[in-house]
Image: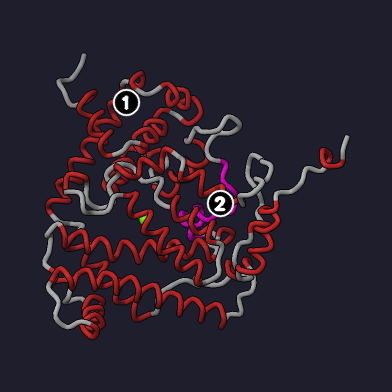
């Protein structure tokens, strides 16, 4: 046997990755070479690192594609301007990558975590989540973050060798750290913290933009909040004469830029002041990626305003009531007639019980599919 058969040549890109990360990444970043691997061991890929593979698996999953027809805040019936769960996810990944690169983090891990962060959302956003939680209250309830883990660990069926996506432990831990913030052994890496912060920057800014587009409120109401007032001041220093539409676009841009800049400055200061030089030190430290106290206060004011003025808009409340009624009826309907479930789900019931199985099936639906199936199976006259 030749020596090359005994020792297959290593792909040059595989060598490059470790060298490249050693040069580019900070000491507190998660390095691919230090990955603890996967639950079902797999040989390293010849030219893709472990977190790049995770990212690719997430992008190719059914749950990721379904985000395009799932509510972020506003349902598809509201128009076609506002964010879906998918476009929100891509915006989070975009902001998180910007932060990750500037902080010299592992961008592949940041992107994998960002693209996976909302996979567990059921149809109809938080209204759907509340309905499923109520249906499952005596059986552990329903939480989108925990459900996201079930999707990537059990529910996705793409590979012959294992259920789920068999993501690396670092990606799973990043998602887990979002669900169990109180567990000391699951403190988030800086990569996971960046995704959380990017989520907050993104939804605070874009929920206000969507509400303006849908004319749920006039821009004047937002300009009474200190965050928007300050952003307006900054914008008008560059361009004084703007109509409402130009002002709105300029403020949105300013808000993201300002918040990202503030997060970077704050985080770099924290990392330097606390002398963080390893992943372990970053995990042991108090939260490193957070806005300045002034900006945090201003964001809180905006979030309180959105909660009272936008998320409780009568139009949204009507959709919420409809979604909750529909999902609860479907839950009871599938429990009463489990033969209506696809065979793969019926087979799962032996392991996890009928209630969790029905919850998993409903959670996987898009808004559109839930409405179609409700109309097809449950909305007509009661069957005997
Ligand atoms: Mg999100």
* Of residues 213 and 5, the one drawn nearer to the viewer in this rendering: 5
Q: Quadrant of the N terminus?
A: top right
> Residue at point 21% right, 53% down?
81
The stretch drawn in magenta includes residue 172? yes
Q: Residues within 10 Å of mark 2 (few under 14, many from 20)?
A: some
Q: Which residue is drawn at 21% across and 79% down?
A: 232
Residue at 45% across / 67% down in the picture? 98
Q: Is residue 189 left or right of residue 10?
A: left
* Residue depicted at 26% across the width and 73% down the height: 301
Instruction: Please name whichever residue, 138 or 54, is drawn nearer the observer in this view of the structure.
Output: 54
Whether 362 is drawn above or below 259: the answer is above
Taking the image as shown, residue 284 lies to the left or right of residue 321, namely: right
Q: Quadrant of the C terminus?
A: top left
Q: Quadrant of residue 163?
A: top right
- Write down the residue under mark 1: 334
Numbered circle sitting on residue 132 = none
Quarter of image, ligand 1: bottom left
Q: How is the image coloured?
A: secondary structure
Residue 52 position, x and y percent, is 56, 51
Q: Is residue 281 among the parts visible in the rendering?
A: no
Q: Is residue 8 visible?
A: yes
Give the percent coordinates (x, y) of residue 340.
33, 21
Q: Nearer the observer, disc 2 or disc 1? A: 2
| Residue 21 forms part of the magenta stretch | no
Q: Which of 211 and 134 is in front in this view?
A: 211
What residue would you read off at disc 2? Answer: 52
Name the image quarter holding residue 197.
Answer: bottom left
Q: Is residue 298 above or below residue 310?
A: below
Judge left or right: residue 231 versus residue 2: left
Give the distance between the C-alpha atoms of the residues marked 2 and 1, in whole angstroms: 38 Å
**Which residues, given as a range, are shown in magenta?**
166-182
């Amino acid at each position: 046997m030749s020596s090359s058969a005994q020792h297959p040549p290593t792909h040059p890109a595989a060598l490059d990755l470790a060298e490249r990360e050693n040069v580019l990444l900070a000491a507190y970043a998660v390095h691919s070479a230090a990955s603890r691997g996967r639950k079902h061991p797999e040989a390293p890929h010849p030219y893709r690192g472990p977190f790049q593979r995770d990212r690719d698996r997430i992008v190719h999953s059914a749950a990721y594609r379904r985000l395009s027809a799932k509510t972020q805040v506003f349902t598809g019936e509201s128009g076609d301007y506002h964010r879906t769960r998918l476009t929100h996810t891509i915006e989070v990944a975009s902001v998180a990558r910007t932060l990750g690169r500037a902080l010299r983090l592992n961008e592949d891990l940041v992107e994998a975590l960002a693209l996976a962060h909302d996979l567990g959302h059921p149809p109809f956003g938080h209204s759907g989540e509340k309905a499923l939680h109520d249906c499952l209250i005596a059986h552990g309830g329903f939480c989108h973050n925990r459900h996201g883990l079930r999707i990537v660990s059990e529910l996705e069926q793409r590979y012959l060798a294992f259920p789920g996506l068999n993501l690396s432990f670092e990606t799973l831990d990043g998602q887990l750290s979002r669900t169990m913030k109180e567990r000391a052994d699951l403190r988030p890496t800086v990569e996971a913290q960046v995704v959380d912060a990017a989520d907050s920057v993104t939804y605070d800014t874009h929920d206000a933009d969507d509400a303006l587009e849908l004319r749920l409120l006039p821009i004047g109401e937002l300009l009474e909040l200190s965050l928007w007032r300050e952003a307006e001041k900054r914008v008008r220093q560059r361009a004084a004469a703007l109509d409402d539409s130009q002002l709105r676009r300029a403020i949105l841009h300013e808000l993201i830029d300002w918040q990202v800049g503030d997060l970077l400055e704050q985080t770099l200061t924290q990392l330097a002041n606390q002398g963080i030089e390893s992943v372990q030190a970053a995990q042991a430290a108090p939260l490193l990626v957070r806005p300045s106290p002034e900006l945090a206060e201003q964001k809180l004011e905006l979030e309180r305003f959105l909660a009272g003025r936008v998320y409780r808009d009568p139009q949204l409340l009507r959709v919420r009531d409809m979604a909750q009624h529909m999902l609860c009826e479907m839950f009871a309907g599938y429990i009463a007639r489990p033969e209506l479930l696809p065979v793969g789900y019926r087979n799962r019931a032996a392991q996890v019980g009928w209630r969790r199985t029905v919850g998993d099936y409903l959670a996987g639906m898009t808004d559109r599919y839930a409405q179609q199936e409700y109309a097809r199976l449950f909305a007509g006259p009661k069957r005997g």
